[in-house]
Image (tube, rainbow, N blue to C red):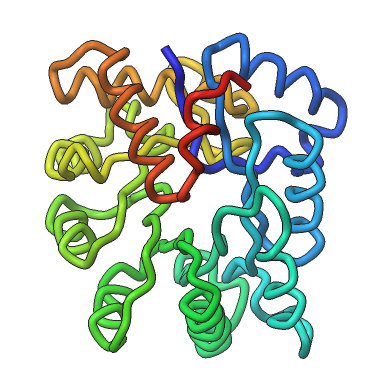
Amino acid sequence: MNVFDTHCHLDDERFDEDRTEAYQRMLLAGVRRCVCVGSDIPSSRRCIAFAASHPGVYAAAGVHPHEAKDAAADYLDTLKALLGRDRVVALGEIGLDYYYDLSPRDVQKRVMDEQVALALEADVPVIFHIRDAHGEMVDYFHSLSKKPSGIIHCFSGSAEIAREYVKMGFYVSFAGPLTFKKAPHLQAAAKEVPLDRLLVETDSPYLSPEPMRGRRNEPANVVYTLRKLAELWGMPPEEMAAITWENACRVYRIPAQEREENA
């Protein structure tokens, strides 16, 4: 089966010793596509460079809420240029993180809103990071006269919130926590998202799924989350892999030829 890891950070320094090997393990596990997601301008550049030299890898460029406070005055001009590079399929990850609050909340909101405007101008999907801020994000989306397309990545909310995001046109992506024994709320949410809006991801090197908890995560491990999602829906993993593959290709606007090619 072919699997699509819709969100990883292979540029992270924790892969410095074995980045190529992690990529090869990904392919051996049947994970034929992944999106390497930036969190600031330097990491976005690294993701784009990695994607350019590794078949099956795409990139996203954006400024994470943690890094919002350090965004340079001309960061939007830089991002606009990066979005035009080959194999860049989304703007992200961006959003609000009220759990760590590593950037002031007003700065998080401003930088997110500026990037949403850029995504609408450039007509690219957006990868949203939302932690302890779902209520505010729902209100924000409702306030927009035009909503971007995109993904609620590493979903952490309730089934009710998941349904709300779907109503607004978003895809909902589940990561390793879906496999945890003490995650009934996530598992309930995963069964409420329509099949044509479901995605899987690793968010590696973070959030390793069972049975890999306690170790660094990597794209190959997305198969564990996929199997759990298939179990929740009562279908074979191969069927869920095909569904989430098609969803990922659709939201990221992967050309038809590239959807079928082996990495």
Q: Split into 4 quadrants, where in the image is the C terminus?
A: top right
Number of numbered callouts drawn = 0
- Residue 108 seen: no
**Residue drawn at (46%, 15%), measured in percent from left and top?**
211
Image location (x, y in percent) of residue 258: 55, 33
Q: Position of residue 96 (x, y in %)?
A: 46, 71
Q: On screen, 65 above or below 243?
A: below
Q: Residue at x 64, y 28 (%)?
A: 216
Report which quarter residue 152 is drawn in.
Answer: bottom left
Q: Residue at x 23, y 62 (%)?
A: 165
Q: Quadrant of residue 175?
A: top left
Please tell me which residue lies in front, 173 or 48: 48
Q: Looking at the image, which residue is at 55% across and 23% down?
A: 261
Residue 251 placement, left or right of 230? right
> Image quadrant for the N terminus?
top left
Task: Residue 95: tell me if it is visible.
Answer: yes
Position of residue 186 in the picture relative to residue 180 (left or right): left
- Whether residue 119 is situated above or below residue 8 in the rendered picture: below
- Work out whether residue 195 or residue 38 is closer to the camera in this orientation and state it: 195
Q: Position of residue 125 (x, y in %)?
A: 46, 62
The x and y percentages for residue 22 are 72, 22
The one of 240 and 254 positioned closer to us in this rendering: 254
